[in-house]
Structures are given as structure tokens and as C-alpha cells.
Image: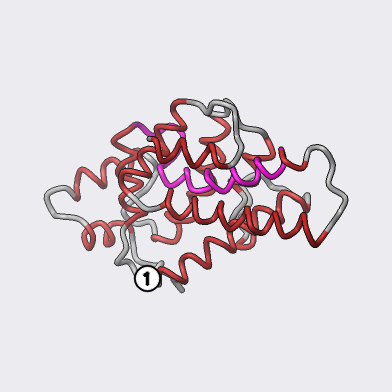
Amino acid sequence: SDTIEASIAETGFEKQLDEALMDRLGELEKYSKFNLDSRMVASGMQNILHYMHEHVSDEHDVNEHRDDTEALMAALLHDVGKSGPASANASEQEAVVRLFAAENISDPEMLVGQAIALCFEPAEAPQLQSLLEHCGIEAAMTMREFWDKHAYWTKDILEHYSEGTTERMRIIAASHHIDHGINPYHITEANPATEAKTIGASEYYLDALHGKLLS
């Protein structure tokens, strides 16, 4: 959509992303507010990076702008895994996004089957569960287990549809919950981890503002 393309342009990113990746961002735009949150995270990231360049270090090289762009793009892409695994078709992606977007789930130990019954009409629940099962999401899985999959799916999606992305961008995006032990790339390097943690902290702050923090 125009909104997605405009957000990407604001980062200074000039390459073309894979069409399938753009389609997934479109699914998130259509069925959730996750892209809006990602844009807010990217804006916060931009302010933090600007402050760091001005006050923390004077050792930036000619690649400074490129590095900022990678981090900002990672912020925009970090939740693309909320559209499901890389193998998910359009209907499966919609089902995954809609379950992620369900707002009245207060217990992370609630089972997926229970969450579907709570949040969706009985007429559509069986089809929704079937689509989720195609993505490896069983009714007996907890919502915490379901939620925690999205960072791994972000990695798989960005690796599968990597056109225009860089390795560093992909690592930062998929590692945003590294503080919680979710480390799809098994990274140890400080630099990507620092920027990934910044995304995770910004997301946590947004959740607090939205009143969505879960135990």
C-alpha cells in the first residue's frame, strides 16, 4: 500500500523488497495495527540513533547512514512474522494475523483453541483452526507458545524473501525479543543485539501504552 511504501521511503531505503514480503506487510496493514506499531518503533529508533550520533560517539564512518537505514528497516519489518511461517498462503496468513491481533486475551497460558472460541464467531472457528493447523499451530498450544513463534517466522520469511534486504537488517529484525531468550540467529555480536533490544524495548513500551502487557 501507499502507507507501507511511504514508511519505507522515510528510512532512506532505496532498494526493492520482494513482492511476497510486501504482500505480507499488506496483510498486517489490512487486519491489524502491527505496522502502525512498527512505524512508531522505527520513529523512536530514529530519535535514539540521532541522539547516539550527536552525544554518545564520534567514531561513525562513511557507512553511518547505511547502518541507520538497516536498523530503521529492521524496525519496520520486525513483526512480519505475525503473518505466519514463510510457507503460509494468503488464507493462512490472514488467520495467523487475526489471532495475533485478538485483543481480549489476558492469560498467556490460555490454549489457542480456547482463544479462538473466545475471540471469533462459532461459524468461522473450525475453518480458522484448520488454517492455523496448516501453520503448525495446534489447539492445545498455549497463546504464549503461539506468540513466541513470530520472531522465528520473521527470520524464516526474511531469509526466504531476502531480495533487497541485508543480513544485518534480517538479524536485527528477528532478534528483537533476544532479551527474552528468543534468538533465532543465535547471535552473540553486541551491535545487532543492541539495536534488536532497542526494538524490543520500544515494543514493550508501546504495549504498556496500549494497556496490553501480559504476565
Rendering quarter of residue 156: top right
Closer to us: 70 or 179: 70
Q: Where residue 129 appears, x then y in whole percent?
A: 26, 47
Q: Where residue 82 appears, x then y in whole percent?
A: 43, 47
Closer to us: 9 or 213: 9
* Magenta residue span: 66-89
Q: How many marks can you see?
A: 1
Is 86 on the left or on the right of 178, as rendered? left
Residue 116 counted in the magenta span: no
Q: Where residue 91 appears, x then y in whole percent?
A: 28, 36
What amino acid type should be assigned to the residue bearing mark 1? Asp
Q: Most extreme residue toward the right, as rendered?
A: 59
Rendering quarter of residue 201: bottom right
Residue corresponding to mark 1: 107
Q: Most extreme residue toward the left, as rendered?
A: 123
> Which residue is depicted at the point 47% across and 44% down?
81
What secondary structure is found at the residue carrying circle 1? loop
